[in-house]
Amino acid sequence: MTPVTRSGIRLPAWLAVPAVLGAGLVGLPLIGLLSCVDLGGLAALLGSPASREALRLSLLTSLAATVLCVLLGVPLALVLARAAFPGRRIVRTVVLLPIVLPPVVGGIALLSTFGRMGLLGAALEAGGMRIAYTWVAVVLAQTFVSLPFMVLTLEGALRSHDSRYEEVAAGLGASPGYTLRRVTLPLLTPALVSGTVLCWARALGEFGATITFAGSLQGSTRTVPLEVYLLRETDPDGAVALSLVLVLVAAVVVGLLYRPGRQA
Amino acid sequence: MTRAERRAAAPALELAFSVPERGLDIAFTVPAGSTTALIGGNGAGKSSTFAVLSGLLRPARSRVVLGDTTLSDSAARRWRAPHARGVVQLMQHPLLFPTMSVADNAAFGLQAAGTPAAASRAAARDMLARVGAGELAERRPGRLSGGQAQRVAIARALVTDPALLLLDEPFAQLDGGSAAEISGLCAQLLIGRTALLITHDPVEAHALTDRAVVLDAGRVVQTGTWEDIARDPATPVAHRFVAGR
């Protein structure tokens, strides 16, 4: 195999070795997973109420988290990339922290904020709201870990596109709101799609923050990753089958929609 | 609008600003309906002047009056946002919005001002035809040559009937043939408009402008018609612009 770029310029041949190793490191375990699947029992397992409920819950909560990531992440990325204000670096660091933080730590942080004993716990309780160990906690945990991916993707795109487009629009009489709608957001569309897909994929696979902050209650907080973890002890075949579903759904969506660096 | 009417409607420009930390202290006027060249070496203050006029740079001390509209007056704490000035800039790079068709690019300024879609598209098509880009209306900007793109950028700028047009070396990236063609087109379209041109090309300057403001190290050192400047050019740059006359 000779790696040749699209421009026809050859890459150094030795690059193929680590590249294949890297792809294999990720790909082989997936093949291993496939080799363990008991296709006969798949239908029965996926028909079980626990699995169906976990799948339904996972889809709904990950979609809700993705919507939140779009609604909050797009403005956040715009402000971080374009506005000048004191403490911008601190805000960016804090927002990106969940990427490097172990998700369990994120779960503990959420619990110490929204839990009964947490920072806002008493106030929330007074308002009759309980968040920890509910589906709302699942969505919050997923949003917490996914949001940085939206901010990172969009901020990168915003920095790479020429801010003179906005200056031209202003010169032509477009107000900041009109410019955002007609110029900036259309230019960001490819990055927005990529960011949304990344957020959704991260939310779908969320485990550590969810189990810490939301627990594992069938039907209300036990998403597919939690169900897989639970089944691993009692029904290894079932765990493999459910994992496969997760892999397939994620592969289809990421494969179809994630296009890094695509230009408008 | 006829050319005579446009000349009557075109505003005069009065500019004064200073940015001490950049060593800039610039003041000059442009008569109504005149295209004036802004010449000077690197760091003379040409780009800063354009940034102040278009509202992208807000110096601590500035006063910019265009006709009877005050664009900024630091003493009175008045300042108009870039989009409320009617000051359009035409740069080296056409910067057409890549997500829109040529027609939508040309109609952008009118639509931003709330002109109904049909009317703004019709006006955009008229203007595209006037700059010789009528047949490009449905194309995407990415598929245009440099000359075609700059024609569309000119149409997009003129369709809003800007009170002041700022031309920042708009032909510098075009090859000789299309630069001459588009410069000729601009010369026609600029008649009766108040405009400023930054250029390093004396031929272009004489083709498009009748007067010049000579900048040097952040100060205005000379203003007047090309004849005035030819009599006693104040800087080597000014000398180069009038040498061949």
Image: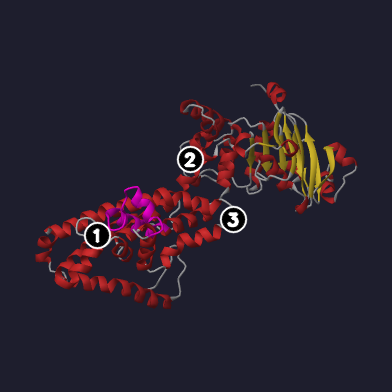
Which residue in the protein does label 2 denote?
A: A182
Q: In the rendered structure, find residue A86 and report the number of the disc placed on it.
A: 3
Which range is magenta?
A118-147
SS at badge 2 = helix
The subunit carrying tag 3 is A
The subunit carrying tag 2 is A
Identity, as a three-letter code, of the amino acid under mark 1: Thr
In depth, the one of A151 and A226 nearer the eye is A226
Q: Looking at the image, is mark 2 or mark 1 earlier in the sequence?
A: 2
SS at badge 1 = loop
Q: Is residue A135 magenta?
A: yes
SS at badge 3 = loop
Give a yes or no on whether discs 3 and 1 share a subunit.
yes
* Residue A112, quarter of picture: bottom left
Identity, as a three-letter code, of the amino acid under mark 2: Arg
In depth, the one of B140 and B14 nearer the eye is B14
Tell which tag, 2 or 1, sits nearer the viewer: 1
Q: Write the residue at 21% across / 64% down.
A: A227
Dots 3, 2 in contact, CB < 8 A: no
